[in-house]
Image: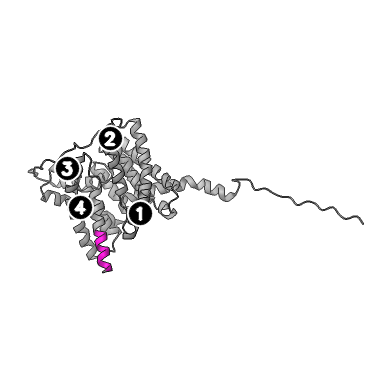
Amino acid sequence: MAPRPVRPARITMPVSGSSPTLHRRARRAPRRFLERSLRGSGQVMFMNNPYTGLLNFVALGWGAWAGGTTWTVVLGAALGVLVATGAAQALRVERAARDAGLYGFNGLLVGAGIPTFLAPTPLMWAVLVFACAVSAGVTRALAELLRPWQVPGLTFPFVLTTWLVLLAADPLPGLATAALPQAGLAAPAVAASVAFGLADWVRAVLASVAQVFFVDDAVSGALFLLALALQSRRAAVLGAAGALLAVAAALALGAERAPVVHGLWGYSAVLTAVAVGGVFLPPGGRTLALCAIATLFTVLVQGATLTLAGTLGVPALTFPFVLGTWLVLLARGRSESA
């Protein structure tokens, strides 16, 4: 009997990219990237919430429409968070941090800050994209540097990157300045002699919140507080209280009326109050006391930074918040370990 022929086994070669899992991942990638970017927007005020981030952009848009900022700043903020989020992905930083938006918020602030102080030229946009990408690398490097002290980098990557760009604008005339302070020693301020009415208090508090995003508009400030409340009502209350305390302290110390009304003495204090009182320390009476002390200290640092940064012709940005919060967290850590 003749042996039956053996039929060769069929070998199926895998087709690259044909896996249903890969298809699903590819479809989800844009949505995941957008969610990370919106969370990055929310993380400007420590909120890991994409809806908070979306409402922040609504507040930015309202501010541009109302004249409290420009559409260039809004576009720069959107571009900044997208570029920084993409740069973090290219750097292959830890996924949990990327998913939480922790590499996007500094890029958003860099993107909003540069067109606030530089003229919107094609070269400015190229530098903005580059600086926002660099901010992600600075964020990662700073996280490694601060790891032994167990303190967060906060917005220092934004401060450092933006300061470097603005300082470079003076010897590089291709980066035309638009609203940079004049370099030199600050002239002594004249104490406000005009009465500060209720409307002034309300505007100063809300503008302080909005100025975190370079917006000078009370309605935008209310929208930013609402965005905070979506995630944490405690954070919203602390932010408003921090602004109120900063405004009161600035007036008591004789700050000029106009900068106070426009929120320029309160925005760093808003961030300090939320960070110390609602994010990095456990809730309680001692935390609230530390929060008040840190907020008042931030106002003093704001004055000192205005003097020091003014000699170089750059704005204070959020450095007072960074320094005040770092010192409180470091002191708190040392006292607990003693």
Q: Is there a contact, CB below 8 Å, between mark 4 and mark 2?
A: no
State whether residue 284 appears in this view: yes
Q: Quadrant of residue 107?
A: top left
Q: Which residue is mark 1?
A: 143
Disc 4 versus disc 2: distance between alpha carbons?
A: 28 Å
Q: CA distance from mark 3 to mark 4?
A: 16 Å
Q: Amino acid at mark 3?
A: Pro
* Cα distance between the residues tagged 3 and 1: 33 Å
**Residue, x 31% and y 60% (percent of image)?**
149
Residue extending farthest to the front is 171
* Mark 3 nearby-residue class (10 Å; few <14, some 14–19, many ≥20): some
Q: Which residues are magenta?
A: 328-337
- Which residue matches tag 2? 169
Mark 1 vs 4, N-terminal side: 1
Upstream in the sequence, badge 1 or badge 2?
A: 1
Q: Which residue is mark 4?
A: 298
Q: Using the rendered image of the protein, determine whether residue 52 is visible from the camera's viewpoint.
A: no
Residue tagged 3: 259
Q: Amino acid at mark 1?
A: Ala
Circle number at residue 197: none
Front residue of 249 and 322 = 322
Give the side of residue 40 with respect to residue 321, left or right: right
Q: Which callout, 3 or 2, points at the residue further toward the start of the chain?
A: 2
Please provide percent x and percent y for residue 214: 26, 42
